[in-house]
Image (cartoon, grey):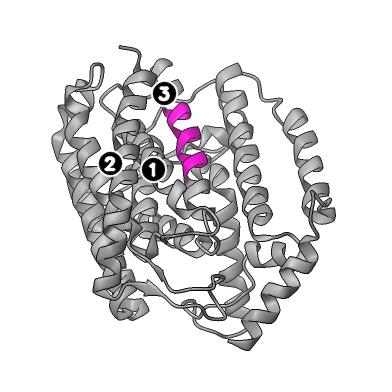
Amino acid sequence: MPPLLSFAIVGAVAAVTTFLLVPLTARVAVRAGASREPDVHHIHETPTPAAGGLAMLVGVVVAVAVAPVVGGLSATFDTPGEILGGVAAAVIVLAVGFYDDIRDLSPPAKAAGVAAAAVVLHLSGVSIAVFRVPFWDLVFLSEEWSALMTVLWVLGMANAVNLIDGLDGLAAGIVAIASGAFLLYALRLTDQGVIDEANPGALWAAIALGVCVGFLPHNLYPARVFMGDGGALLLGALMAAATISVGGRSTVEFSGQAFFFYAPLVIPLVILGVPVVDTLFAIVRRAVGRRGFSVADREHLHHRLMRLGHGHRRAVIVLWLWTALLSAFVLFPTYTGRGDAIVPVGIAALALVLFTIFHPRFGYDSVEVDAEELDRLKKL
């Protein structure tokens, strides 16, 4: 069976499982008290259950259980410890996030829980072992530095997804696009012999894509269910496991990687450029304002788009398009062997910038919609 078809089957299993279980987990969320009330930081009008992450976790577990019997994926389970470590890490971050959705964990405790999941990944073998500095050399990390880099990477990925989860369908859509692009990237590197068939990176990317696709129909505006911090941290952990598996071990230069693409760990930072940039801006913004990183505000990219005049749906679509554009920027040279993706991608980026700034009206006045929404939030 072709590898892409095998991963598509695993992703479909994750998607169907997640989709079917979301209504059930929504009822569990209501009984457990995991519900988001409308306030100045959350743009919704009615209390909404925030336990979609529970359905996502079951989707992950079922997909992993099915994967060994899917043709073409047996090599991925030659090192079962890495797969079990990934599942254990997923359970830990989901538990931490879900508890936070119910009881409001302190930021240090929440970070410690995510760090614990990262340590589990490291101990199971999913760890950043090498780091290529562009235009310089390949650095082999010591055990201590490897553990530290792995923890920081997982914390960064988890928080980036969590911070961008501010509009209905936004985080799930971005991670779906990014994980799909990274799946294609990992398959290309496997075809070229840069990574071996046993590398689990493509499997984690396919599962992340699947759970996002299964969750999105319930989460599109107006959302019936939120993924909650548990779901956001889970997606971040899955992306971290995928990117570490591929980029944290590769020692071979690939001719299709132009310029900074010689550093495989830079690839996910480009593909996930929207949440990464949003996170960096949030860190700088709060440092300048001398506020804690955990203090919520309404200055994220999606909030700024809505203040520009984009409605809820259009703001989400714009950020989806930016993620797709950045993904194309990565995949074009990877599949063609040429580093000239900057030309077509640059033209598309210019068009998207113009759309983002001038936001032509498509059938309704989005400025009016946004003004009404902001007025409602001021009254809360």
* Image position of 19 with respect to 284: above or below: above
Say few, some or many: other residues with alpha carbon within 10 Å of mark 2 (under 14 / 14 to 19 / 20 or more): many
From the image, tell me which residue sits under label 2. Answer: 17
Task: Give how far across and how far down residue 155 sits, in percent.
Answer: 38, 61
Task: Measure how far apart labels 2 and 3 are at the Cα level.
Answer: 24 Å
Q: Quadrant of residue 205?
A: top left
Location of residue 364 by image quarter: bottom right
Extent of the magenta region: 176-186
Q: Which element is circle 1 on?
A: helix
Q: Nearer the viewer, residue 206 or 244?
A: 206
Direction top: furthest residue: 1
Q: What whole-number distance in Å separates the C-alpha atoms at marks 1 and 3?
A: 22 Å
x and y, in percent, of residue 82 in the image: 20, 40
Determine if the magenta segment contains residue 197.
no
Q: Residue 11: which numbered mark, if any?
A: none
Secondary structure predominantly adopted by residues drawn in magenta: helix
Q: Earlier in the sequence, mark 2 or mark 3?
A: 2
Please give left or right for residue 14 compared with residue 282 in the image: left
Check residue 187 in the rendering and tell me which mark sits there, or answer none: 3
What SS does tag 3 mark?
A: helix
Which comes sooner in the sequence, label 1 or label 2? 2
